[in-house]
Image: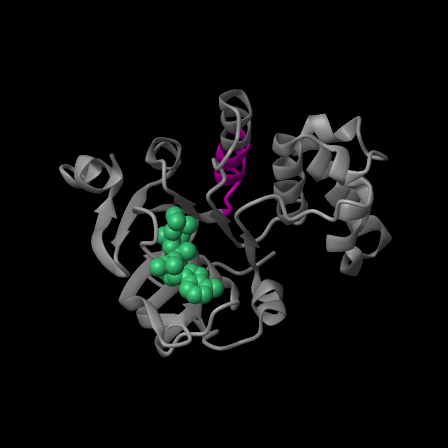
Amino acid sequence: MTAPLPGGTPLLELRGVSAGYGPYRALFDVSLEVAEASTVALLGPNGAGKTTVARLCSGLVRPTSGRVVFAGAEITGLPPWRIARAGVSHAPEGRSVFASLTVEENLALELASLGRRGMASALARAYDLFPQLSGRRRQLAGTLSGGEQRMLMLARVLAHPPRLLVVDELSLGLAPVVLEQVYATLHTVRDAGTSMLVIEQHASHALALADRVVVLDKGTVMYAGPTAELGDLRTRFLG
Ligand code: ATP
């Protein structure tokens, strides 16, 4: 069990972060927080910088200035594996599964460090969260449908519950029925106490899940506050 944070310490903090790709600046002085046991929706139009924030949280992009703090400890510039070990899981856009491995092999790879008993209970949890995968344990991941591959990607990051889940554009290309299903799973995971930063271009599912919302546009924060107070920005930026 992880000890609760001292009162008022956010689980994740970006403090005045700027970042980019080579000479291109994608984020300008971005500050945001995710409180423990809360969910933040990170919304905004195409190219706003949402994925760049996700990459910052998991260490795939390093800030050019500013700080990233997780559970009260500086993680700015740490390599992704150390940030993952601290408790941040990043479910990236797309499918991200090993096509030529089976469903169970995909899960087991992620859980290799848990030992035999830890792995058995993590696998049970994965199949509990995504029952469709249970009957397909020996099927090659590359032969799953697009929606099932997305479920497998999520099952991999949720089998061993992270302290913070960063999930990027889950809705992309998913059939409505599958979308409902994966968001229902995220509600279950949230209710069990996992904190989340949920990135979406299509806002409604993320807003239903989140306590707070951050709207990014052109690499800057346009709004940060309770979901209920989003007001005009909902139509202005989110369609
Ligand atoms: P989308 O909803 O379209 O995925 P986004 O809000 O997630 O957009 P980012 O993917 O963070 O936005 O991109 C922010 C800016 O950084 C965009 O202008 C994009 O073209 C640029 N960018 C993103 N990744 C790279 C990269 N690897 N190399 C160069 N520029 C990049």
- Identify which residue is drawn at 78% across, 54% down: 109
Left or right side of 24 for 196? right
Q: Is residue 31 above or below residue 42?
A: below
Its colouring scheme is one colour
Spot occupied by residue 218 in the image (x, y as percentages of width and height): 25, 58
Q: Quadrant of residue 22?
A: bottom left
Spot occupied by residue 139 in the image (x, y as percentages of width and height): 82, 34
Residue 189 is covered by the magenta coloring: yes
**Residue 96 visible at all:** yes
- Identify which residue is drawn at 75% across, 39% down: 142
Spot occupied by residue 2 in the image (x, y as percentages of width and height): 57, 59
Residue 56 is covered by the magenta coloring: no
Spot occupied by residue 106 in the image (x, y as percentages of width and height): 76, 47
Give the total of numbered labels. 0
- Identify which residue is drawn at 77% across, 61% down: 113
Q: Residue furthest front?
A: 23
Left or right side of 182 for 48? left
**Rendering quadrant holding ligand 1:** bottom left
**Foreground residue, 2 or 79?**
79
**Residue 56 visible at all:** no
**Foreground residue, 177 or 142?**
142
Q: Is residue 63 above or below residue 163?
A: below
Q: Give the extent of the magenta segment.
A: 184-194
